[in-house]
Amino acid sequence: MTPPPHRPDGGLAAYDVIGFDADDTLWQSEDGFRANELRFVELVAPHAPDGVDVKAALTAVERKNLHTFGYGVKAFAISMVEGAITITGGKIPTDVIAELVEMARTQLEEPVRLLPHVPEVLARVGAHYRLVLITKGDLVHQTHKITTSGLEHHFDELEVVLEKDPETYARLLARFDVEPDRFLMVGNSVRSDILPVMALGGHAVHVPYHLLWDLEHVDHDEKFTELASLADLPALLGIPD
């Protein structure tokens, strides 16, 4: 599904509300997870049995824990500790466990690193549209990132959700008082930001990030608009320079 056409007078695209994902759409996120994942393999592999794919085993633990612990750094930390214990049959040294915990603590305390063009794009788009932020993950950490990002003032609504599925989006759109065909979602994850919105009859723009969590990959046959950069969004919406 492509965005609706511009109005006959050549004006702005016909949306009432535009939603933005946060992690890896507005600021870096997966970079920290990927670095810690690589370090996990370095720390645990020497204690694992021969032939064990440590990275794949960690991903399997994360998948198992997803519906119990949800998303975010804290859930990742629990999965790392559990994975280290199960992969090594309980032989992982306690100093390795301590380092895994410290890695997660450091990741939680990292400053927000905005992606290129984000503040100016939000300012330009927000001058013409009502903006909402929809992000999933740990409430405390996500709220901290939102409030310290310097971007909070661009949004009329700030939503931290447990999951991004059609039911969640339907509930949010009802609360925003916007019909799906008048809503546009912008994000980096096809699984979380694109397909659920399109399933409701809404519109979506995919802005890929160079890293994507294994559990966010999804097979699909849908057609949708994809931008090389968030900087291209104002032009797509018909916003003049």
Image (cartoon, helix red, strand yellow):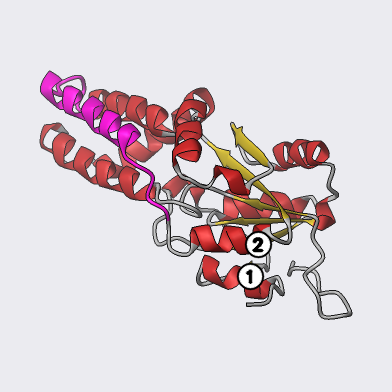
Q: Is residue 30 above or below residue 54?
A: below
User: Magenta stretch: residue 106 in it?
Assistant: yes
| Relative side of 49 to 183, left or right | left
| Relative side of 140 to 13, left or right | left
Looking at the rendering, in which quadrant would you find the N terminus?
bottom right
SS for dot 1: helix
Which residue shows up at 53% across the image and 63% down it? 120
Assess whether mark 1 and mark 2 are in contact (beta carbons under 8 angstroms): yes
Label annotation for residue 129: none
Which residue shows up at 18% across the image and 22% down it? 98
Which residue shows up at 26% across the image and 33% down it? 106
Q: How many marks?
A: 2
User: Magenta stretch: residue 132 in it?
Assistant: no
Q: Is residue 217 visible?
A: yes
Magenta stretch? 88-114
Q: Quadrant of residue 97?
A: top left
Q: What type is the residue that disc 1 sits on?
A: Pro
Q: What type is the residue that disc 2 sits on?
A: Val
Position in image of residue 116 (x %, y %): 43, 63
Position in image of residue 196 (x %, y %): 69, 49
Work out how far the residue at label 2 is from the one at label 1, CA to CA, in angstroms.
6 Å
